Image (cartoon, rainbow, N blue to C red):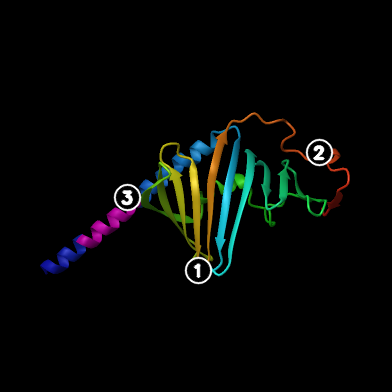
Amino acid sequence: MKKIIAFIGIALFAITANAQSSERAKNYLLEVTKKINGYENMSIEFSFNQKDDKNNSKNFDGKGKLDLKKDLYNLTFMGVQKIYDGKKIYTISEEDEEVTVSKYDAKGVDGILPSQMLTFFNKGYTFQWDILQNVNGKKIQYIKLIPTDKKSVIKEVYLGVDSSSKNIYNKIQVNKDGSKSTLTVNSFKTNQSMSKNHFTFTQSLYPNYYINNID
């Protein structure tokens, strides 16, 4: 009987600790969301790495730059620039000398806006408090996110947050098939001076480009 009572006590302690860990992580991410939503604009330089399987047989690395003002964005990645002015998305390919113009569709390929990706964790995940790491002199607090959708291809996500600034440092996504992707913020600037045309497409700057209106 004593063993049973002891076991129940340990089980209850584990459940309580789990709940406290989840609540602590949730409150921490609420602070991160509040901080992000308080910026007038953001300018982010990032690196991206993707490993396709457990053996790392396929590895991809790339760097990019993202400017955000609420939902408006100007993104450059892999030689392609994307501009969203609030209504349409302009995809500019310097190599092809082509601009593809499409209407924003929330259910389409570009439906998830970069601004939403910074706060993606607010829906569809449970939270767990994870390790604190010292990275290049910064204290990075990790929160483990587990999808609530059992059919999700994602196994878990680790979100690293600079404990001093409460800004996101990196996001590590581990998929069920063994693939893994890491997005790391190399530079994070806020409330920058940006021209009023920074989030609009100026056709005169691309005189020889083919304009492909698909919508």
Secondary-structure class at tag 3 = helix
What residue occupies the far top of the structure in this picture?
A: 193
Residue 67 placement: quadrant: top right
Secondary-structure class at tag 1 = loop
Amino acid bearing label 1 = Gly
Q: Main secondary structure of the magenta part?
A: helix
Q: Position of residue 117 (x, y in %)?
A: 57, 49
Which residue is disc 3 drawn over? 20
Which residue is disc 1 drawn over? 178
The relative height of residue 188 versus residue 154 in the rendered view (above or below) is above
Q: CA distance from mark 1 to mark 3?
A: 30 Å
Work out whether residue 119 can be spotted.
no
For the point 67% across and 45% down, which residue is it?
75
Find residue 202 and name its label: 2
- Return the residue nearer the eye: 137 or 149: 137
Q: Which class describes the residues within 10 Å of circle 1: few (<14), some (14-19), or many (20+)?
A: some
Asked whether, in this view, residue 182 is left or right of residue 208, the answer is left
For the point 50% across and 58% down, which residue is it?
173
What residue occupies the far left of the structure in this picture?
A: 2
Amino acid bearing label 3 = Gln
* 19 inside magenta stretch: yes
